[in-house]
Image: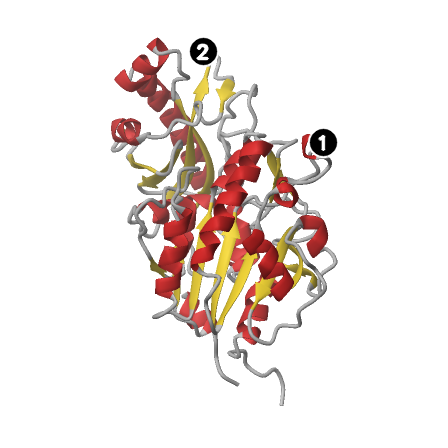
Amino acid sequence: MNASKALLVSLDGLGDRLIPELKGKTPLEAAKKPNLDRLAREGITGLMNTVAVGVRPGSDTSHLCMLGYDPKEYYTGRGPIEAAGVGIFTQAGDVALRGNFGTVDEKWIIKDRRAGRILDVSELCKALDGLEINGVTFNVKAGTGHRAAVVMRGKGLSSQVSEADPHVADAKVAAVKALDGSREAAFTAQVLNAFMEKSHAVLKAHPLNLERVKGRKLPANFLLLRGAGMVPRLPSFQEKWGLKGAGIAGGGLYKGIIRLLDMELIAVKGATGLPDTDVKAKFAAAREALKTHDFVFVHVKATDIFGEDGNWKAKKEFIEKVDKGLAEVMGLKEVFIAITADHSTACCFKAHTADPVPLVIRGNGVRVDDVKSYGERACAKGGLGRITGLQLLPLLVDLMGRARLYGA
């Protein structure tokens, strides 16, 4: 059996629910997408629950599943992945967290979890970087848009602490609490609560926020913390799957996953992780990377961003932008192309849902089914049926002719 290569594309938050304004279709179903529909006609389709049926997946746990790593075994929290994504060096004993720069009032009631989707928080991170509380130093570095990674370094820390971010607006920032009875968890919670007090004071007085208030923009006056974890020990992608892998992403979380799996992170000019990202350049880079790699993973974020904003029109239009960019890889030979998503993000909820996501795989020898278009309901009729995220990589590896025989 001749071994082939594979391209896996994750359109973050692609799945959706029916939109009345789109005549009862989803943004994906309503979009003009000739390349995606061609892949459906020439490939095999199905639905995928990235984690499990009925589970609302996070972007971290879902992508680990899609790349073949069971989060029950390997996931320690979102923080370490974010830290890897922005390039913070971590060591044993460090605790890493994800942060959102948001807007709160004087009573710490959240007015906006993303401070009006502020685009650049690097100056705010510099103002917080190096803060020290009770012998613990905070390393704070900007991610994409409103996002940041925070690493705590000091003695006697624990990742067994609760989240300060309630994940909804009009709720109060939660006090961090120990999740077990250890002295380390109690100490870490105490330090984090003190850090929130101190950092809020710094952010309120920061010139960037004073300028935003003058301009009637929401100030990024609070760093909402969540996803505490210690650095996980993961087998490399090549060790686990026998494939030389590469990844292309603009967002810090996804760069972090690529780095933690020891895949080559390919930098692409214009890959921002935001709606202005250069999708065409990403797919062109993937095409080139497949000349020297067995497997290339491409992540595209803005479908999720528009879903979380409830902007079904922009989500539909961005899907059409992605479809045009796919022209860069449609002519690939001896390459299996898989297009799917890490989760659904419903515009009506402005949040992740447990709805399964559509999946298509095109390549030599696949059992082409009767599905003619790429969409949530069309793919439900496909030959793959319904799979989980942890089944995706074994399926691709087998199609590529690289799977090991189970038994004699």
Amino acid type, residue under disc 2 in the picture: Glu
Q: Does residue 133 appear in this view?
A: no
In the image, residue 4 sits, relative to residue 56, either above or below, namely below
Instruction: Say what secondary structure mark 2 lies in.
Output: loop
Q: Position of residue 259 (x, y in %)?
A: 36, 56
Along the line of sight, which residue is nearer the eye, 184 or 359? 359
User: Relative to residue 83, is residue 67 drawn left or right?
Assistant: right
Location of residue 119 (image quadrant): top left
Of badges 1 and 2, the one in the foreground is 1
Q: For the C terminus, give its image quadrant.
A: bottom right
Using the image, tell me which numbered label, if any, was put on residue 20: 1
Do labels 1 and 2 touch, CB within 8 Å?
no
Q: CA distance from mark 1 to mark 2?
A: 39 Å
Q: Residue at x 51, y 17 (%)?
A: 109
Along the line of sight, which residue is nearer the eye, 343 or 175? 343
For marks 1 and 2 on the same chain, the one whose residue lies earlier in the sequence: 1
View extreme (bottom): residue: 408
Q: Position of residue 209 (x, y in %)?
A: 33, 17
User: Relative to residue 197, is residue 396 drawn left or right?
Assistant: right
| Mark 1, other Cα within 10 Å: few <14 / some 14–19 / many ≥20 | few
Q: Position of residue 394 (x, y in %)?
A: 57, 70
Q: Residue at x 49, y 42 (%)?
A: 160
Instruction: Say what secondary structure mark 1 lies in.
Output: helix
Q: Residue at x 39, y 25 (%)?
A: 196
Q: Residue at x 50, y 30 (%)?
A: 165
Along the line of sight, which residue is nearer the eye, 257 or 78? 257
In the image, residue 143 sits, relative to residue 247, either above or below, namely above
Using the image, tell me which numbered label, if any, was put on residue 106: 2
